[in-house]
Amino acid sequence: MVDPFIYHNPTKVYFGNDALSHLHEELPRWGKNALLIYGGGSIRENGIYDTIVEEIRKAGISAYEISGVKPNPEMPLARQGARFCRERGIDLVIAAGGGSVIDTAKVIAGSALYDGDPWDLVKSRAQISHALPIMAIPTMAATGSEMNSCAVITNPDTHEKLGWTTEALRPRVSFLSPKNTFTVPPAQTAYGSADILSHILEVYLNRAEGFDAVDGFMESMMRSVIRWAPLAMEDGFHEEARTNLLWDSEWAINDLIDRGHSVSWTCHALEHELSAFFPIPHGLGLAILTPAFMEYVLNEETAPRLARFAVRVMGVKEGKNEIKTARKGIRKLRKFFTKSLYLPGRLSEIGLDDALFEDMAAHAMAWKSTDGILHGFYPLTEEDFVAIYKKAL
């Protein structure tokens, strides 16, 4: 039987090309003194920034802004933002950008009411009861952070990239406009699509009993990403492709598909250390590590699930030998990443070697386990983590 659970996702979502036109309606309901957070300035170039500023003006509230969020967000900017909120009496945080921007906004909103170092809250997995309200305006399909209660952030001083999950971090309102993703470059589209696939696979690869309908939903979403991602890369203005990818990204990680059993998030644990030690995109790391992980854990116990993935998602013909079928599916997945998304298939292709693998594995295990074993799709030790990194090399 599935484990007992509560499902509650109160994020209000406006979806459609006119979604952002409703921002001025929602702003006064949540605050009067907002902080707008964004990244490197692309929203100024594509017109999204001007639209947001006009919506803020129409709402009649005041607003400040902080920019410069990095692709792998870091604590110094989050500390600066939290301090700014306290000093200026900010009562609402608006995030406009990708998952890194939204995650930074979450850490700022969650720590603005705390006088200490925000890293204390992240490191301790603090279950806070209050945070500043968050509104999210995603500009790419990837993390789904605009509809969930998790933030991932890096402490560059300690080489730790950790997730902080607490219900207070869930955005109150999110504005999802496919047209706001039209100008995302092909490489970023590929990284985001790999992230979406990984979010689903991390849940799907589970030997615990689940819901048949949810399994089918996950398979359908993965097929959707595989279908639409290459088209969005080929033509950024392909509205059907952008629309499907954006909605896939939400349901991949908004607490629906993972209800009823625990999820170990093994590949994410491995990748978080990879991009904590090296400046590589999160989605790229996942695209390289995921097939290596699947190959490493393939055995008689895991073969049924991996073979089902091969048949129902990757289109492999069902055979009598589940291990052989599973291997074909893993090969097709790696080929999708390398030939359809044009991503490197090995860590060595992006200039990495094995010098830090043991340190990375130790960091990952220390965060994910208290007994030295990560109990997931297949039990793994710190030595297994090192072996997976090497398999991906």
Image (cartoon, rainbow, N blue to C red):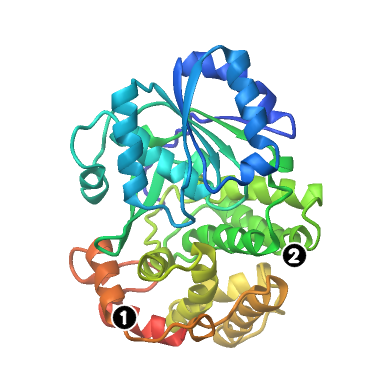
Can you give x and y, in whole percent of width and height, for residue 26 in the image? 56, 19
Crowding around mark 2 (Cα neighbors within 10 Å: few <14, some 14 to 19, many 20+) is: many
Residue drawn 56% across the image and 11% down it? 60
- Residue 133 or residue 91, whichever sits in front: 91
Q: Between marks 2 and 1, how big is the CA–CA gap?
A: 33 Å
SS of the residue under disc 2: helix
Q: Which residue is mark 2?
A: 230
Query: Residue 330 sits in which quadrant?
Result: bottom right
Can you give x and y, in whole percent of width and height, for residue 355 in the image? 32, 85
Can you give x and y, in whole percent of width and height, for residue 259 in the image? 44, 47
Is residue 24 rendered to the left or right of residue 361?
right
User: Between disc 2 and disc 1, whose residue precedes?
Assistant: 2
Residue drawn 36% across the image and 33% down it? 109
Can you give x and y, in whole percent of width and height, for residue 53 in the image? 61, 26
Q: Which residue is mark 1?
A: 356
- Above/below status of 209 relative to 118: below
Is residue 370 rendered to the left or right of residue 263?
left
